[in-house]
Amino acid sequence: MNTVPNAGPVTAPGPGPTLSVVVCSYTLDRWDDLCAALDSIRAQRRQPDETVVVVDHCPALTARLAARPGLRLVESPERPGVSGARNTGVTLARGEVVAFLDDDAVAEPDWTERLLAGFRDPRVLGVGGRVDSWWETGRPGWFPPEYDWVVGCSYPGAAGSTGTVRNFIGANMSFRRAAVVAAGGFRGDLGRIGTSPFGCEETELCLRLTARHPGTELRYEPAAVVRQHVPPARTTWRYFSSRCYAEGRSKAVVARYAGSRSALSTERRYVRRTLPAAILRALGRRRLRAAGALGAGACLAAAGYTVGRLARADVGATAATADAGDSGAAPAARPGVAAVSTRSRP
């Protein structure tokens, strides 16, 4: 792990647990967004104890960020992808609470205050907030708000008031760092790599945390708000359909680890209640393209989930056949949880 020697933490701590904010980035293409994200952290009324920026295998980005003051800058030594980058941030962080902000999201000035307030309750393992969408070129008429999860934002049908939730949206979440370390961090076989549409690494971690700590909770705080930039590339039908399908494939992996009952509890309510009501509204308003997108998105996600489950069954059957044919062979390697180091941190 290579840290930039002349970088230092922002040290303006406030009341409550100490806080590290982690921002992961992998490309110079988001430079303006990244600068806006970092500026929003510096504008917090309750300054974090440090801001950790993890560069995911992009030396040119590291070089440009090195001149920016007030950061702890680190190059991820993990394999490329958001899970490895986040685990690097958790390893490096000094705060009792670690919060994650996407490199293309901007936090409201009271964001850190709102998140940290939830940790006054010792039963709370994590606090997540609302993610509003900012459409650079405007929302397409066919793109229904119920699918704002496609662009990483809060959506109708998700939690709307303060309370316990199953999982957070990755752009706006925080956890007790010790709990994440003890659980092993984010899984290395989930999460985006570059522009790939796969995800759900935060869902799987949230499920694993609450399973390991009965009687605890993950709390949603809608007043902790960030605004997510939605660029033109994410407003196309191609992106929409690929994300819906990839979400199904990703949920199949989560179900493999956590069981389908836990992995799909929120999705079942969404499909049974939120989508039918939205389709009826769209049809009633003669918004046929939006109604079509609502139905097609659900079908694509279901197809992705089915393919993901069948692919795993094929892998399992092949492995079982190989084991039966050669009892001395080593079992096939199974992707595991990406390691989070517990060594002394710089």
Image (tube, rainbow, N blue to C red):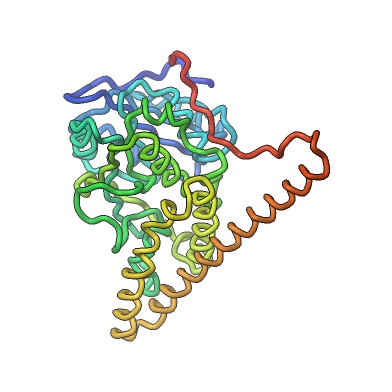
Residue shown at the point (54%, 40%) measured from the top left: 81
The percent coordinates of residue 109 (x first, y second) are: 20, 39
Residue 32 appears in view: no
Residue shown at the point (19%, 53%) measured from the top left: 161
The percent coordinates of residue 342 (x first, y second) are: 46, 19
The percent coordinates of residue 54 (x first, y second) are: 46, 31
Residue shown at the point (53%, 44%) measured from the top left: 190
Q: What is the quadrant of residue 176 in the picture?
A: top left
Residue 261 in the figure: left or right of residue 249: left
Residue sitting nearer the eye, 269 or 106: 269
Residue 251 in the figure: left or right of residue 140: right
Residue shown at the point (44%, 31%) measured from the top left: 183
Tell me if residue 181 comes above or below residue 204 in the rendering: above
Q: Which corner quadrant holds the C terminus?
A: top left
The percent coordinates of residue 103 (x first, y second) are: 40, 41
Tell me if residue 73 comes above or below residue 323 in the rendering: above
Q: How many marks?
A: 0
Residue sitting nearer the eye, 61 or 301: 301
Residue 284 appears in view: yes
Q: What is the quadrant of residue 173 in the picture?
A: top left
